[in-house]
Amino acid sequence: MLTYLFRRLLLLGPTLLGVSMIVFSVFALAPGGIEGALVANDGNLTPGAKEARERYLKQRYGLDSPPPIQYLRWLNKISPVGMKQDDIGKYTGFGFKSPDLGDSFMRNRPVRVLIAESLPYTLMLQLISVPVTYVIAMLAGLLAARKRGGFFDVASGTFFLGMYSFPVIALSVLMIGFLANANYIKIFPAQGLSSLQADVWPYLPGYANGHFVPGYLLDVCWHLIVPVICLSYGNFAFLCKLTRASVLENFRADYVRTARAKGLRENVVLFRHVFRNSLIPLITFLASLLPSLIIGSVVVENVFGIRGMGQLFVEAAQQRDFELSLGITIITSTLTLLSYLLSDILYMVADPRVTFE
Amino acid sequence: MENRFGFKDLVLMTLLFGVIGVVILAMFQFDRQNQRVVDIATNLNTLSQQSIALSQQAEKQTAVLNQIRDQLAKGIVATPAAAAPTVSTPTTPTTPAAAASADTAINIPTGPTDPFGPLREARSKPDFKQGDWYIANFGTRIGKITPLVSSDVYGSEVQARIQETLLTRDSDTLKWKPLLAESYEIQPDGKSVIYKLRKGIKFSDGVDFTAKDVVFTFQQILNPKIDAARARSSIEDVGTKVEALDDYTVKFTLLKPYYEMISLTGYTGILPEHFYSKFTPGQFNETPGLLMGTGPYRLANPETWKPGTRLELLRNDYYWGVKPAFDKLIYLEITDETAAETTFTNGEMDYLPAVAKQYNKLKDDKKVMANSQALNYYNMLGGYTYVAWNQKKKNNASGTNVETPFADKRVRQAMTMLIDREKLAAEIYKGYARPATGPFSRSGRQADPKVEPWPYDPERAKKLLATAGFKDVNGTLMTADGKPFKFELMFPGGSSFSEQIALFIKDQLAEGGVQVELRPTDWPALVEKLKNGEFEATTLGWSASVESDLKQIFHSSEIKPGGDNRTSYASPELDKAIDAARACIDEDQRMKLWNACHDIIAEDQPYTFLVERQTLRLMSNRIQNIKKARMGLNYTGLEVMPLPWYSNSLKYSN
């Protein structure tokens, strides 16, 4: 077991190296090269001192050296062991140092800070939508499996499949256009995570000066409803089918027959025996969801004006901000690899038949 | 008992996570409330200072009154001349109260030099109301609002509300008016200018504004460690030297007479030295929201704004000038078009920039128009679209530059006459555009009003092409050596709008027998090709400024790698005219010289100037006093100028 873990962790390094190399090559080989975007994104096209700015940026970010050197320099920056640098960028010696994700060209701010700013919004969205998805899909899957081929099974299957096929971007725009539009039904806010007046409201709903005030908590929840729906609905189908299949499989197992033969009530059989055992594939699936937690909500963030990680990554890629893109890539690919490892371990924990010896 | 994760545990876990989530949210809210308490405490503090100052004043006045009473009792006639100086013994205006009554503290003479003219006029209207919020939208995510180091226009818009400049431009006459300066005087040598600053102006934290701040601003720009290469290069080129002659007099000296001297020196937002000198260049470069100034608005905290939090500008209680109407300016960051439109039609936003199709749709929607107003106008800063004809194409095989047919003036003129720009404006811009006559906005002072757009005249074009050696064979134009005349038109790929224009040009030229091959090109690659001259023709746009510099685009000295004269257009006559205009300090005379440049360019057609487009926007009906002006509207977000708009209903309050 330990050797297996050790081997997997050792493999992590080369894989990450490969990933970063590929991403970097994509940037370097694109027409215009890495510095192409610096010229292209320099504000609006006012004839101005473009050249001076270009020269300055090239020197500041070392873009005038050949791409392989730039890549090595970046590797040195993110590694915990390597050449140390002083404040003005001169190399002072070799040794342990604090790894640094570098600076964003476009924003001229540390990548670490940019990620720290965006991550909470995305995590909040996902940490609400994932449990919601799981609870609804699992319940639906259970019910569907209980009466296999019955009305609920067919209806939920069709409905969820329909939702699965409906693009997020279309639904979120439609939701805004109809449910947040004063010309149709205005029950939800169109944008953002809080109302304009929210910062003067109390935390809990109540009355202030004789008016009802929703309060900060309710306001945030109210703003979250539509984005969470848009984030969750597409995953219902997959999870529901997964639960259904797993429950059905367990229904056929010997221990269920025994339980039924003992004269246990059907609900007890379902929830105490079958349900627990059916959870195994769902738990392992959860682990593989981890990476998508980080940048899986691009569309929703964009439409609802939430400044999360998806937004940040898309912007970085569009503007060819290579240190920012690589920073995010490294973080997400580390998470992906770790989550695969985690899901393997969870497998073993959940099902004693699996070993890695 | 089995030790397994059961349903009860699941419920408990969910509850636990729920509680944790709620606690985290509560922490954010407490943080915000704490910030608010601090704000209130600060306000209370200033209020109490105000009341102290007022009571002091009252005491003094009572004393004076007593004196008068005594004197009256004594039977001496008090002449007003004797009493007046005692009454108005100045209490130094150290509080916002005193500063807010700025009309009395700082004397701003009304008349042609009064920058607050339009605002004063608005304030005298019967439905004028002080208060309410103005909510606009930036259709993008703002990364940074720190001056000098922020690169996008949205940052500039916020800075223009918070930091003021020595001078401001009148939106109608386009002439300079003193703002922070009281007056300015160009020295007889033509390369230096002296500004006299107004006394008694304060930054939004109550510290006095003096000549030191002006000097500091320029030192900051010239500091090579500050990431302000763009601003720096224009100042370095002319060798600006700035010195404070005394606390309220600043002198700028340039190496040589330069036409932009006034805008370079007088139109730079002034940074407060006491505030910005606290930060190292590194901190200045990297902090997204370091913004403080003398302007009518301020950030709640000049240091801590971060991207992702809402951008709200509050009223500056220390403001020295005439107060604008709105208590708060809010800038949303809605990127999605549908979401922006919905927010606007819901009445949650006061301003919606629109594209032609959307504008027409909303303009005809009675429900929407019941509470909004539709505006279309020519914005001077809007710029123009063009087709650039490359006269020397870089040949990749030999590495040398080869002359293209466009080196012949007659060919370029013919191309212009083959493209129906009126039709382009009507079809693609839905009529919200007009043909451009040259590189200057037609409403600006630089443009020669006598220059008319070239006519759409395919017959004349064909004759002109025949004189240039082209032959018409069954509707196809042949070059002198018997090959069909064709060229590649490069345009930014991925933009459907550019594609429409490119297709339109292709159609129009095909009617004249010219074959156009479209080359949609990824933006970075396009820039690279422009730089190297590896193209034959391209259609793009330039944005404009109130006074545009032609040197960058059309002067022959800019035919170099990195220069913006990408078409290798060289005209000694134009070079001379541009140099003359750039060396001319007198504005009225200079405009005549620019007019002459315009004439030459219109004749030479180095570009085919396509159209100037209108700016289309919808505004909420609440917002009053929106008028068209030469600059576009009587208030332009990007320019430093007092905001003359107001709301006639107090929808929001602090």
Image (spheres, coloured by chain):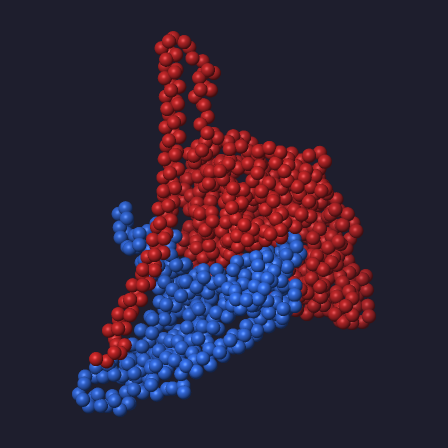
The front one of B327 and B130 is B327
Figure quadrant of the C terminus of chain B: top left
Q: Is residue B11 visible?
A: yes
Instruction: Give me the residue at 34% from left, 60% from top.
Output: B24
B564 up-or-down from B216: above or below: below
Shown in blue, the chain is: A
**Quadrant in which residue B269 is drawn:** top right
Residue B595: percent from left, percent from top:
71, 45
Instruction: Give me the residue at 53% from left, 68% from top.
Output: A81
Residue B143: percent from left, percent from top:
51, 56
**Left or right: B548 with respect to A1?**
right
Residue B36: percent from left, percent from top:
36, 47
Q: Is residue B335 visible?
A: no
Count the numbered circles shown. Answer: 0
**Left or right: B532 with respect to B287?**
right
B495 up-or-down from B47: above or below: below
A331 up-or-down from B277: above or below: below
**Quadrant in which residue B75 is drawn:** top left
B459 up-or-down from B63: above or below: below
Shown in red, the chain is: B
Q: Residue furthest left?
A: A263
Instruction: Give me the residue at 59% from left, 59% from top.
Output: A89
Instruction: Give me the residue at 46% from left, 52% from top.
Output: B305
